[in-house]
Amino acid sequence: MNIPTNIFALASVLLLSATISAQAPLTVDATASKVVWTGTQITGPHSGTINVADGQVEWSTEGLAGATMTLDMSSIKNTDMKEELAAKLEGHLKSADFFNAAEFKTATFQTTNVSKIDGAESGKPNYTVTGDLTIKGITKPITFDVLAWRDGKTARVAGNAVFNRAHYDVRHGSASFFNDIGDKMIEDNVELTFDLTSREK
């Protein structure tokens, strides 16, 4: 049976397209990546860092295609208080009152959808990301904008994500769980500002 040569040409094009669009994920460089947390109580905000344990960024010919990130909950640090007070706050945040880092050693994020922001200005967020955020073994969806770009074998993803800690059973000082807590109230919303650097292996 004679098969037209254009069939082979079409098959080659499709195979090449599949190969290009299914590029190997880039590995997050934990030492070059940074996550800053900010929480707010009646007296004002506090902030600090949390280490990225690992992650991947998926990049196709169309741009950002997906990402995963794992945070080391035992690495929570405070950076805006004096050393003794900072250590006390860090211990409290790692305790069962908050994130229970002894039992739940990591928190994870995995994208479920990535869409380009049409007409995004240079230097402004250019993708909207939706994904599953898991904290204390509880998984909830979250959506936020990111600025993502690639330069050769390196890709960067930066942005701000806000999650409601009450959704993850983080109860201490939360008006969602306790009435009449007055000036001991701590806001439920926690902001994560992140800058992930990933590289081809």
Image (cartoon, rainbow, N blue to C red):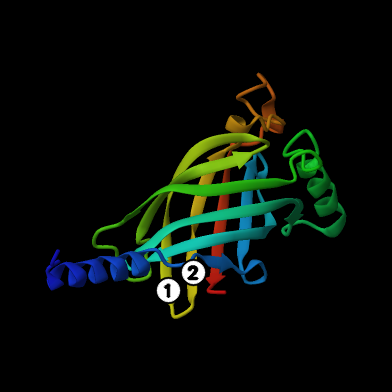
Say left or right for 40 vs 89: left
Pick the quarter of the image with the N terminus: bottom left
Question: Hey, what amino acid is under mark 2?
Answer: Arg
Q: Is residue 75 above or below residue 9?
A: above
Q: Position of residue 4 (x, y in %)?
A: 12, 69
Q: Does residue 121 appear in the picture of this structure?
A: no
Q: Is label 1 in a helix, a strand or a loop?
A: strand
Question: Hey, what amino acid is under mark 1?
Answer: Arg
Give the residue pinned by disc 2: 156
Q: Does residue 118 appear in the picture of this structure?
A: yes
Pick the quarter of the image with the C terminus: bottom right
| Residue at x-position 55% and y-position 42% | 133
Q: Earlier in the sequence, mark 1 or mark 2?
A: 1
The reply to whether callout 1 and callout 2 are in contact (CB within 8 Å) is yes
Q: Position of residue 128 (x, y in %)?
A: 37, 52
Which mark identifies residue 150? 1
Q: Is label 2 in a helix, a strand or a loop?
A: strand
Say left or right for 105 vs 141: right
Number of numbered discs visible in the structure rendering: 2
